[in-house]
Image: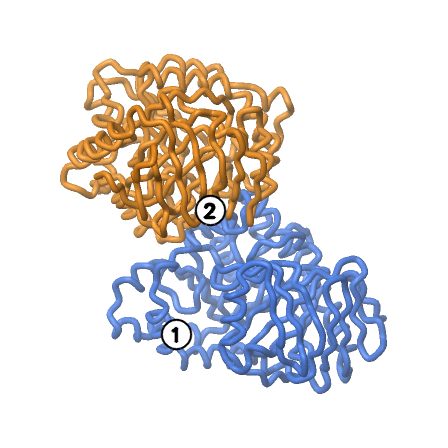
Chain colours: A orange, B blue
Amino acid sequence: MRDPRLAKLAELLVNYSNEVKPGDWSLIMGELVTLPLLRELYRAVLEAGAYPEIVLSDPESGLLRVQLGNDEQLNWVSPLQEMALDKADVLFRVLGTDNTRRLSSADPSKLSTMRAAARPMFENYIKRASTGDLRWVIARFPTEANAQEAEMSLMEYEDFVFQACMVDEEDPVAAWRQVQADQDKIVAWLEGKKKLVAKGPHLDLQMSIADRPFINCRGDDNMPDGEVFTSPVEGSVEGWIRFSYPSLEGGRKVEGAELIIKEGQVVEAKADKGEDYLLSQLDTDEGARRIGEFAIGTNYGIQRATGDALFDEKIGGSVHMAIGHGVPEAGGTNTSSIHWDMVTDMRDGGQIWVDDELLYENGKFAIL
Amino acid sequence: MDPRVDRLAQILVEYSCEVGPGDHVAIYASHDAEPLVRALYRRILRAGGLPYAFQGYGVYFSYGGYDDIFFSEASDEQLKHVFRTDNMVLREFQAMIVIRSQTNTRLLSGVDAKRQQLRNQAYSELHKTYLARGAVRELKWVVTLFPNDAQAQEAEMDRQSYADFVYAACHADQAAAVASWQEVDRQQARLVDWLKGKKQVHVEGPTVDLRLSIDGRTFLNANGKVNMPDGEVYTGPVEDSVEGWIGFTYPAVRYGAEVEGVELTFERGRVVQAAASKNQEFLEKMLDTDEGSRRLGEFAVGTNHQIDRFTKNILFDEKLGGTIHLAIGSGYPETGSVNESAIHWDMICDMGPEGTITIDDELFYRGGQFLID
């Protein structure tokens, strides 16, 4: 028998996150190893009266392209994928792999080339998402490789994932509606505010949030979810931040990353591990050194970092910042082919002040 | 089938375990290693042996691969139980092939160390029997690895590249694989012979200047009989003789913790100064384990030049051609070592193109090559 939580997760993604309606062309994308969740999504989309289409990818073939591809081949973008992302009504992107380090020894400049080539497609996708033309969600299917990366057995990891998504609860949809209501209060309080200062043992930052709305992440685009974020005014970010948790990007681990930011631009960067990779990513393009996002994680069901941004950035009691692409819904104007979230713990003395009022202290909202 | 899989099986059966007619041979592997298990099964039958394939995660006592369930569910009584098949294999069998092939290398990260300790205690009698039978080759056991995704991920590689790495390290990419290991055995036997009766070792390199005595100690030839891959000669230095300084060029890995840039200074055999560029606290804690953990239990020279990179797996790393390694903690009695400790922690140092080992004033080794006749 299938894990009942998997069916509940699929139903949550279809009926709550993406609100699939009859007639929606619904793309379901994932690697081979995620097939059990893709099938559950297929079933739930059918039950919603829409048109499911599974798009499977084989990561070993993807690696071959990086290893063997010439410049033209690396710069090539599949017209099939381009068309699908331009026309589909709904997109489910299921994460989950059979080797999280597959790309560790791949040439980072080739990866950057491929990412840059896909940028117009990515921008179109972001644009369609921001206008509501494309309803999308990213979710994770728990695999052995991801469990290993999280230093857990598969059974423990499944519990971790499903708990974070609240699909172990009787009524996951109701639980997520409650998250939405709580976060609405925070977003409303932040409306019209101008200056944000975040400080603590791991950071000392200030930025302008004037005319930048905070967005309520309530499980509509990410599952799990639980954060409020904005794109700070591009040139306004000043200060220093050290990220508490390792970040795994493109199969490479970056630990102890530290950034110094002046006039919205990363002017100095170092890391205990993976510094070369961090620096190469900062040089991806013009926008890669700018701050695309500042956010506060609110999912207290996630208590440990696992090296997976989808989960780590939601940790209740943490904040995160992304270098690279900004979010248009939040007023962000920065463009880049990267958007790299890095997370910092606030539970040991972190504070957030907004227009000289205390918003947040030691991982909890002071205004709630 | 990948021909290298069958060649690895051939090495393990014909060379490592020397399986003969009537030998009972246990194989421990996960389902990921199925291709190698099938090849072994065939090779063992052809050699006249009797193969027993057990599902397990490459521990001597196996839980059918359900180790995480065993440790989370077992009562104390169940934890203390010695399984009958383990008794049978370790007391009665002639050979045992353990294939590291976990589908998740971090399966037991969440297990309480106390529960594991309880388990180890319950098996301590059997463990002694296994060591004793192993020492006289009454039980010919060998540990190897199958390159599945989990192992590749641990090494931070994709599976194909990792498989190339593993099979090359085991010489399974060579047509005459068994002959190649026989040659390793001969070459290393020559070294061990030459080292007999020698007294003083002086290791010099870009990050090392160390003197130690091997007076009365025996070098052993790690020739692929109990580890595959293999390739090292090692001994236990005279406990109070080690003097000097070494900076290890690779991270020292233990219990998943990595200590980078370890530097040790020895006086009269004891570590008197220890520094690390990362995780120094852990290093110091380990050094303070007991009396023996500040002394060397092993001095070894890696000889496997087919291993060309560090992968955070001691089965491979300590054999890297062009490196030496030292272990703080317990020594091997077969070498004459009398150092006792609850730990045995190997740390590896690249000798570079100019690093030398001088023995009784004769130049023995330079830049990964042995210079004796």
Q: Work out whether residue A43 can be spotted.
A: no
Q: Is residue A63 left or right of residue B223?
A: left
- In this view, the residue in front, A219 or B75, is A219
In the rendered view, tell whether residue A196 sits above or below residue A286: below
Q: Which residue is mark 1?
A: B120
Determine if marks 1 and 2 fall on one subunit: no
Quarter of the figure with the C terminus of chain A: top left
At x 46% / y 55%, what residue is drawn? B101
- Residue depth check, mark 1 versus mark 2: number of the one nearer the observer: 2
Disc 1 to disc 2, C-alpha distance: 33 Å
Label 2 element class: loop
- In this view, the residue in front, B221 or B283, is B283
Q: Which residue is mark 2?
A: A246
Few, some or many residues within 10 Å of mark 1 (<14, 14–19, 20+)? some
Amino acid type, label 2: Pro
Label 1 element class: helix
Few, some or many residues within 10 Å of mark 2 (<14, 14–19, 20+)? many
Q: Is residue A266 left or right of residue A93?
A: right
